[in-house]
Image: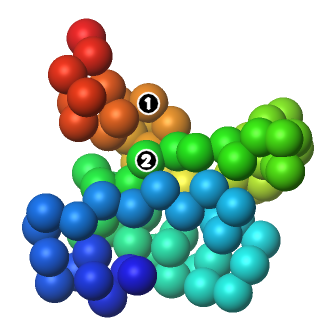
Amino acid sequence: MAGVLYRRDNVWAMPDSYFPGSIGEEDYARALRSFASERFIFGSNYPVNPTDAHLAVIDALGLPDKALDRYLYRNAAELFGIS
């Protein structure tokens, strides 16, 4: 998926239950820190992933504040036209 995001500007990712904590986690985190920070959208996958626990794991990744803000809120707001 990270490779597709690298090659295609019109693709967005919402990995929900596949990130973090599964195979490819480091690739997703690397993409979030760099070239695809504006094309990831947070999805909690609730109730499979309890939201508080899911957010704690994401916080532990040490993403830069700007990337975290984009991932958890701003990207979806821009995509769906929410101010």
Disc 2 crowd rating (10 Å Cα; few below 14, some 14-19, many 20+) is many
Q: Is residue 81 visible?
A: yes
- Residue hosting label 1: 73
Point 39% across, 72% down: residue = 31
Query: Which element type, helix, strand or loop, lies under badge 1?
Result: helix
Label 1 amino acid? Tyr
Disc 1 crowd rating (10 Å Cα; few below 14, some 14-19, many 20+) is some
Q: Can residue 59 be seen in this view?
A: no
Relative to residue 65, is residue 12 drawn left or right?
A: left
Write down the quadrant of residue 80 in the picture: top left
Label 2 amino acid? Ile
Q: Earlier in the sequence, mark 2 or mark 1?
A: 2
On screen, residue 48 above or below 12: above
Foreground residue among 15 and 70: 15
On screen, residue 7 above or below 67: below
- Residue hosting label 2: 41
Q: In which quarter of the image is the C terminus?
A: top left
Residue 50 in percent (x, y) is at 87, 41
On screen, residue 59 above or below 24: above
Write down the quadrant of residue 17 in the picture: bottom right
Point 55% across, 62% down: residue = 15
Residue 58 in percent (x, y) is at 69, 52
Point 83% across, 49% down: residue = 49
Query: Which element type, helix, strand or loop, lies under badge 2?
Result: loop
Foreground residue among 72 and 33: 72
What's the CA distance linking mark 2 and mark 1? 8 Å
